[in-house]
Amino acid sequence: MDKVSADSTWIIIGVMCLLMLSLLLNSVLLLSKFAGMGMGKGKGMCLGGEKEMMTCPAVKEEVQVSSSSNGSSTTTTVVSLDSIINLDHGDPTMYEAFWRKMGDKSTLVIPGWQLMSYFSDIGNFCWFLEPELGSEIRRLHKLVGNADTEDRYIVVGTGSTQLFQAALYALSPPDATEPINVVSASPYYSSYPSITDFLKSSLYKWAGDANSYSKEGPYIELVTSPNNPDGYTRQSVVNRRGGLLIHDLAYHWPQYTPITSVANHDLMLFTVSKSTGHAGTRIGWALVKDKEVAKRMTKFIELNTIGVSKDSQLRAAKILKAVSDTCEIKVDQADNFFEFGRREMSKRWELLREAVKQSGMFSLPEFTSDTCNHSGKITEPHPAFAWLKCEGEIEDCESFLRGHNILTRNGKHFGMDSKYVRVSMLDREATFNQFVKRLSNMHS
Ligand SMILES: Cc1ncc(COP(=O)(O)O)c(C=O)c1O
């Protein structure tokens, strides 16, 4: 062996040793991470968007591979045949793939001395709203055509969850002898009852399914459109005198539903959690027609959290700007954010329907196509959740799927029976693919 080839042999051996060492270190890191998760359970470490339903994420076989050349790291999710697939909560990790590709266009660096004051815009009634976020919200709604921002007041919140509570406070009559009833048509978003009754407020209380509500007097109806969990477009159902409406439009975006009209309701809630996938940024916004209601919502947030994280607001502004910039390029291109989302969701729904057909044990809601004013295309709704029904003799669909290591949310949490479960469609691709594969192999 000459010197050159001997040298290269030693280099190859060296590189292999380093790789082995890196793999070993990653495994140790992962083990300690998962052990830490277990320890945190029950101690508030796994709190998240969907309140009490939120559990620690199931242990996935997730391998972190660090590339030493440029210091960047990528995450590969490997889901083995028998691992637990957790589709119980709507964690929007599907969108990581898009934002990875966006690179610096969505990166924000904040020097240590910036954004230190409590105040963002003291001239504005919502003094903690960063003006840049306000303008990007208006710009995006105008480009998408999904909501009217003209003559509307914007209130920013720590997720739309905080805004929902601020809206309940703002709409409730302050001097009533009885709490105002809060209703929503079942199946309704499972967090509404628990959030509404959590503090046992004397202002408002949960009163159940709007479909069977028949009391006289004022009430608040929550209208979620497209609906979580079943994906249908909705309108108010009670329609009695004294009704106050909160429209939760978290999913009123082109990747989930054809946009057929510009929403212009009195009080509309939106969130980056479901529009762009940035659930961890915890930013939502309300578009409010009545200034007094907007002021009362602002007061609630002032007393609740003295405003909303400026760092998060600026991150959200950067993300919304990046989305709008992609909307200004041709809408049918894959680097258009909503086109990316629509294609991905469409593919996933196709795979899920195919798996349901192959199995013969389940059924799914059916949707009709419509023309989307944003893309100009005729498209079907592709909801963020699948409202799956166990057909035949299985009464408890959630337990049945848990027996196959698939975690979903029981229909009873949505005011329905246990033959139904809600399944998140927004997880990472590997998890979703493993889910449909497992489903298609189930036979009665
Ligand atoms: C209908 C609906 N509204 C609100 C939320 C919560 O949004 P945020 O993360 O902004 O608090 C969710 C989350 O799943 C939802 O499905």
Image (cartoon, rainbow, N blue to C red):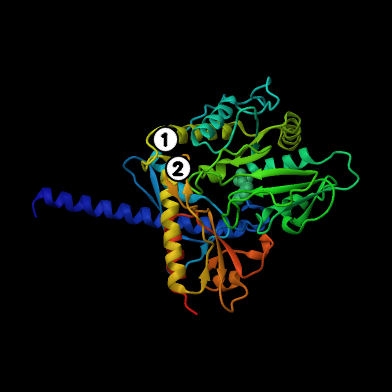
Q: Amino acid at mark 2?
A: Phe
Give coordinates of residue 25: x percent, y percent: 41, 54
Q: Nearer the viewer, residue 311 or 27?
A: 311
Q: Which mark is residue 326?
A: 1
Q: Which mark is residue 92?
A: none
**What residue is rendered at 47% in x and 67% in y?**
83
Query: Most extreme residue toward the top, as rendered?
Result: 123
Label 1 within 8 A of ligand 1 by Cβ: no
Give coordinates of residue 86: x percent, y percent: 53, 61
Q: Nearer the viewer, residue 203 or 339?
A: 339
**What residue is rendered at 54% in x and 39% in y?**
146
Q: How many marks?
A: 2
Q: Which residue is mark 2?
A: 338
Residue 27 appears in the figure: no
Badge 2, how many Cα within 10 Å: few under 14, some, many 20+?
many
Is 124 positioned to the left or the right of 438 in the image?
right
Check disc 1 and report its element: helix, strand or loop. Answer: helix
Q: Amino acid at mark 1?
A: Thr
Check disc 2 and report its element: helix, strand or loop. Answer: helix
Q: Earlier in the sequence, mark 1 or mark 2?
A: 1
Quadrant (top left, top right, bottom left, bottom right) of the N terminus: bottom left
Give coordinates of residue 265: x percent, y percent: 66, 38
**What residue is rendered at 48% in x and 40% in y?**
373
**Disc 1 from disc 2: Cα separation:** 9 Å
